[in-house]
Image (cartoon, rainbow, N blue to C red):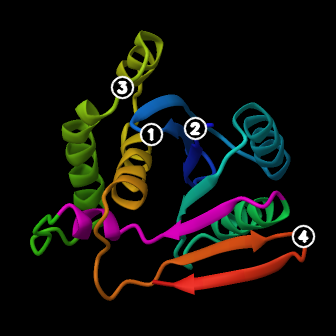
Amino acid sequence: MEEHILVCDVGVKNFCYTVFKQNQLIEFDILAITDKKLLDLFVNLHKQYNFKYIGCEKQHNRNPKCIRYSHYIIAFSILNKIQYRMINPRNKFTVLSVDKEDITTYYQRKKLATLLGQENLKKFSFSDEIQKQINQLTKTDDFYDCLLMYLTTFITPTKPENTKEETGLLENEKHTRIFKFV
């Protein structure tokens, strides 16, 4: 059985999720989210794909609602015995060996992520319907953030040095929580 992986870029108005199976992009969407919508979305997606892993962009302290959503994702992962990883948003640049000294603002980082995402999109296979959906995006940075998080966390074998990533796993039926800081 092949493993499906869910990767999320948390946002209130632009919550993006992507579903991958190896190097194939199976599904993605960008939507406005609420607490109930988030739970319903994850329950339905997990029923359909039975995720082995969930990756989620680690949230900064500036947006309490997004932090709450990321904690919901962690709780969902634990309750459903899904391994999860909270991904530092800076890792994608480090793993891809991008010189980011001149990149100092949020908007410059978003533009760089979009350019890197467009460049790396060719590494994935997807349906014509997904291609049409990508072409119709008006705000692409969230989608490309998810794509780069998947590429740099689950595909690229090297990990950046001196980074802390929170990972979790429920083992057996004991419901023991294991954290590993890489």
Q: In the structure shown, which secondary structural element does the residue marked by tag 4 occupy?
A: loop
CB-based contact (under 8 Å), mark 1 and mark 2: yes
Q: Residue at x 18, y 39 (%)?
A: 119
Q: Earlier in the sequence, mark 4 or mark 2?
A: 2
Q: Which residue is mark 4?
A: 173
Report the mark closest to the observer, 1 or 2: 2
Q: Residues within 10 Å of mark 3 (few under 14, many from 20)?
A: some
Residue nearer the viewer, 34 or 9: 9
Q: Earlier in the sequence, mark 1 or mark 3?
A: 1
Q: Residue placed farthest to the right in the image?
A: 173
Q: Earlier in the sequence, mark 1 or mark 2?
A: 2
- Is 81 contained in the magenta span? yes
| Segment colored magenta | 80-96
CB-based contact (under 8 Å), mark 1 and mark 4: no
Residue 98 in the image: above or below residue 26:
below
Q: Residue at x 55, y 69 (%)?
A: 86
